[in-house]
Image (tube, helix red, strand yellow):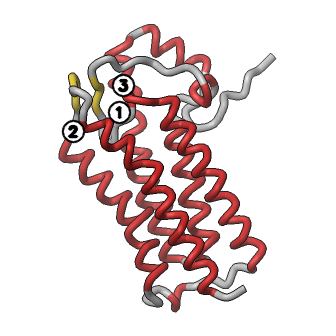
Amino acid sequence: MDELFFRIALGVLLVAYTMIRLPHARTYKGVKKIKTEGQKRERLLVGLATVGTFILPLVWVFTGWFAALDIGLGDEIRIFGILLAVLSLVFFHWVHKILGQNWSPVLEIGEGHTIITQGPYKLIRHPMYTQVWLWVIAQFLIASNWVIGLTGVIAWSILYFVRAPREEAMLIDEFGDQYRDYIKQTGRVLPKIRRR
């Protein structure tokens, strides 16, 4: 297939990602925050992740700057990447819908925050993180480019591994045993394997 097809596909997927997120970003602005943590660190992490998972993929869509680092994946693998991205966007929409006003782009707890245990949250504590892992892998496959693959995975990994433990500590502090019990029943980004 023509390279233009994959550039257009990733461009459309990035627009779809933005369209799914925008209404939730507007809702977030209207929620009163009652607890925040490390706002400077959080904004730096979000900025880094945005560059790796959104800005550089957009540069790839519109320029040939990273062509020297193409890895030549076959069309079948790149089309699988498109399908994986679409699946991740459906999951993204579902997670946002279930999460509602509890969503925040940074570490904070809003007024009326609750522990969500339905939908994907029945099995996974952080399905939004699961979605982003799927997303960065999909972008790597679609672009078939080391710059897009490595910057996405590295930027997201930094945010995830710095934030996730702090987020869980914050939720334990807020909800105590209720959240500890929830941890025992669920996996962080994948369902917990239950032993019999």
Q: Amino acid at mark 3?
A: Ala
- The percent position of residue 169, horizontal first and vertical second, equals 36, 25
User: How would you rate the neighbour count of disc 1 (Cα within 10 Å): few for under 14, some for 14-19, many for 20 or more?
Assistant: some
Indicate the position of residue 100 as horizontal and vertical percent values.
Answer: 43, 30
Q: Is residue 97 above or below residue 148?
A: above
Q: What amino acid type should be assigned to the residue bearing mark 2?
A: Gly
Q: Quadrant of the N terminus?
A: bottom right
Q: CA distance from mark 1 to mark 2?
A: 10 Å
Q: Quadrant of residue 63?
A: bottom left
Which residue is under mark 1? 166
101 vs 104, nearest the viewer: 101
- Give the left or right position of residue 36, taking residue 99 as reference: left
Q: CA distance from mark 1 to mark 3?
A: 5 Å
Quick one: SS at disc 1? Answer: helix
Q: Residue furthest right?
A: 196
Q: Earlier in the sequence, mark 3 or mark 2?
A: 2
Label 1 is placed on what type of residue? Answer: Arg
Closer to the chain start, of discs 1 and 2, is 2
Mark 2 — residue?
Answer: 38
Residue 159 image offset from top left, x and y in percent: 38, 49
Discs 1, 3 touching: Cβ within 8 Å = yes
Residue nearest the viewer, comparing 46 with 160: 46
The answer to whether the residues at label 1 and label 2 have Cβ atoms under 8 Å apart is yes
- Measuring from the top left, give residue 139's x and y in whole percent: 56, 66
Report helix, strand or loop for mark 3. helix
